[in-house]
Image (cartoon, grey):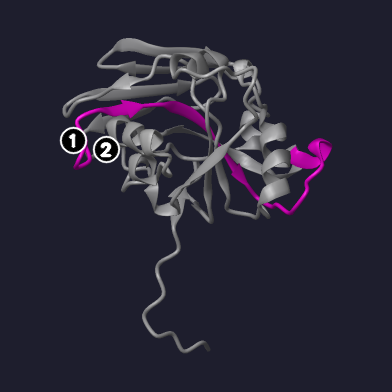
Amino acid sequence: MADFAISPPEVISVPTASGARFPVRRVYCIGRNYAAHAIEMGHDPDREPPFFFQKNPDNLDASGEFPYPAHSSDVHYEVELAVALKSGGANIPLGDAMSHVWGYAISLDMTRRDLQGEMKKMGRPWEIGKAFERSAPISPLVPIEESGPLDQGRIELHVNGEPKQDGDLNQMIWKVPEMISYLSEYFELAAGDVILSGTPAGVGAIEKGDTMLAKVEGLQDFEVKVV
């Protein structure tokens, strides 16, 4: 048995629809993967290759509550389809990519937009705006055997009952198999990896007391309270 200098950290996991836990290894997030959102953020989706950043595994939070974070006065919602992997590898062929998918969930890529903007201006990484505590609310994961492959269907977000984001999964610039194959060229993927697949247009700010209702066709609606 290994002799650890300190007690090892607990295994990070999120719930599945059956009640079992899904252990999380890494969280990859693709940026500007819906053309309309890329445009609203001031970028040209026809000219940019895909890019990814990472959140931390323990940023995923299935509690249904989002604590408004410190050091920001401009926190934005971004509804996304989360893709959980059961296996991985390097240089995964496009035709094999979907064989590595365990299932799906609804997630929110919560963003301290003001801090992210400051980092962009200085040419620095975005972690301070993206990878803060509980910045990725997530619904229970549903196995692909139950949901089927989610490559089309509405993706929506409502705040206090008012529609804010409304798109379709088929509007993704880079589809799920392409994301997996492309990522695997630069990182060796493995079981427990989670990919947040981008957000449609309509992102905006939330305040304490707001209720966010996230929807992806084929999955159970997911409600998150801002506290």
Q: Is residue 158 above or below residue 22?
A: above
Assess whether mark 2 and mark 1 are in contact (beta carbons under 8 angstroms): yes
Residue wearing tag 2:
65
Residue in the image at 37% along x and 33% along y: 121
User: What is the secondary structure assignment of the residue under circle 2?
Assistant: strand
- Image quadrant of residue 6? bottom left
Q: Separation of disc 1 and disc 2 at Cα?
A: 7 Å
Question: Mark 1 belongs to which amino acid?
Answer: Val
What residue span does the magenta drawing correspond to?
68-97
Residue 198 point in image, percent of width and height: 52, 28
Residue wearing tag 1:
227
Residue 85 point in image, percent of width and height: 63, 46
Q: Earlier in the sequence, mark 1 or mark 2?
A: 2
User: What is the secondary structure assignment of the residue under circle 1?
Assistant: loop
Residue 219 point in image, percent of width and height: 51, 27
Which residue is at the front of the view, 78 or 160? 78
Instruction: Count residues near mark 1 (Cα–Cα under 10 Å), then give few for <14, some for 14-19, many for 20+.
Output: few
Q: Is residue 84 above or below residue 80?
A: below
Instruction: Mark yes or no: residue 137 visible.
Output: yes
